[in-house]
């Protein structure tokens, strides 16, 4: 019996990844560098501030950079771009259907708690979630299973009683390592990836049938 849905946050509930990518691409362009879509998408999901992004820049420049100063500048630009982003299509519908069915709802995010809480509250989507697991709650973020295991414990469900929703390959790997049925929903940044480990791949959440997903998860 499926009792809970556990959703990633960045790129699944709110498209923070397009603004983050745009802010980094501006920095790379200033340095005369180019990073492919596949390389960039492959580093997402493990951290809100992936160290690989700095490493790519340092490798291209052939020297270290002031990461703290760069982070501050880049984050300001990301927040500027993010200001106009709303909850991704289909998320509110999925949340409403889950609550109507009596399902528990959780978030499992590699980002820090303040980031997730603030954006959910600002967009009126904080209250429906019964548990929110963030980077501070676990020894390791994705692709380790810790975040999904923490979310399961917080919700009081077993792995076979929950469905995970993810938009990154690191996230899918994390969910599968925790023993969950995992639905991949690629976004504008990650749609170039293959998601071979996911149990189901959806082009978006707008056309998702929760009943069909639950039926598929229970058959496996």
Image: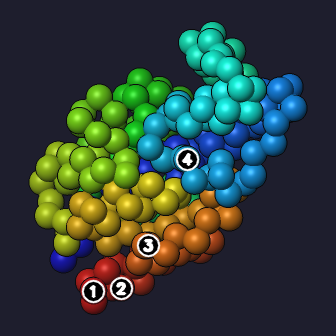
Q: Badges 4 and 3: C-beta atoms under 8 Å apart?
A: no
Please name the residue that numbered disc 1 is placed on: 220
Indicate the position of residue 177 as horizontal and vertical percent values: 27, 62
Q: Secondary structure at mark 2?
A: helix
Please name the residue that numbered disc 2 is placed on: 216
Q: CA distance from mark 4 to mark 2?
A: 29 Å
Indicate the position of residue 102 as horizontal and vertical percent values: 26, 63
Task: Examine the rendered structure and indicate whether residue 39 appears above or below residue 102.
Answer: above
Disc 1 packing (10 Å; few <14; some 14–19; many ≥20): few
Q: Earlier in the sequence, mark 2 or mark 3?
A: 3
Query: Looking at the image, what colour scheme do you see?
Result: rainbow
Q: Earlier in the sequence, mark 4 or mark 1?
A: 4
- Residue 150 visible at all: yes
Which corner quadrant of the image does residue 84 belong to?
Answer: top right
Front of the two marks 4 and 3? 4
Q: Secondary structure at mark 3?
A: loop
């Amino acid at each position: 019996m499926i009792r809970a849905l556990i959703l990633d946050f960045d790129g699944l509930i709110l498209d923070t990844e397009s603004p983050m990518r745009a802010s980094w691409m501006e920095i790379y362009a200033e340095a005369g560098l180019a990073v492919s879509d596949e390389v960039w998408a492959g580093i997402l999901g493990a951290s809100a501030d992936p160290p690989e992004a700095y490493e790519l820049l340092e490798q291209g420049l052939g020297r270290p950079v002031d990461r703290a100063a760069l982070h501050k500048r880049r984050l300001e630009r990301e927040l500027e771009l993010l200001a106009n982003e709303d909850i991704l299509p289909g998320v509110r519908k999925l949340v409403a259907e889950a609550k109507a069915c009596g399902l528990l709802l959780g978030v499992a995010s590699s980002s820090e708690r303040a980031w997730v809480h603030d954006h959910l509250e600002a967009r009126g989507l904080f209250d429906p979630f019964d548990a929110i697991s963030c980077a501070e709650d676990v020894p390791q973020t994705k692709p380790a299973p810790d975040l999904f295991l923490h979310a399961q414990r917080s919700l009081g469900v077993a792995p076979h009683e929950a469905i995970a929703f993810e938009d990154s390959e690191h996230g899918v790997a994390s969910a599968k390592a925790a023993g969950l049925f995992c639905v991949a929903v690629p976004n504008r940044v990650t749609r170039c990836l293959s998601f071979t480990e996911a149990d189901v791949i959806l082009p978006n959440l707008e056309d998702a049938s929760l009943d069909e997903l639950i039926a598929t998860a229970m058959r496996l």
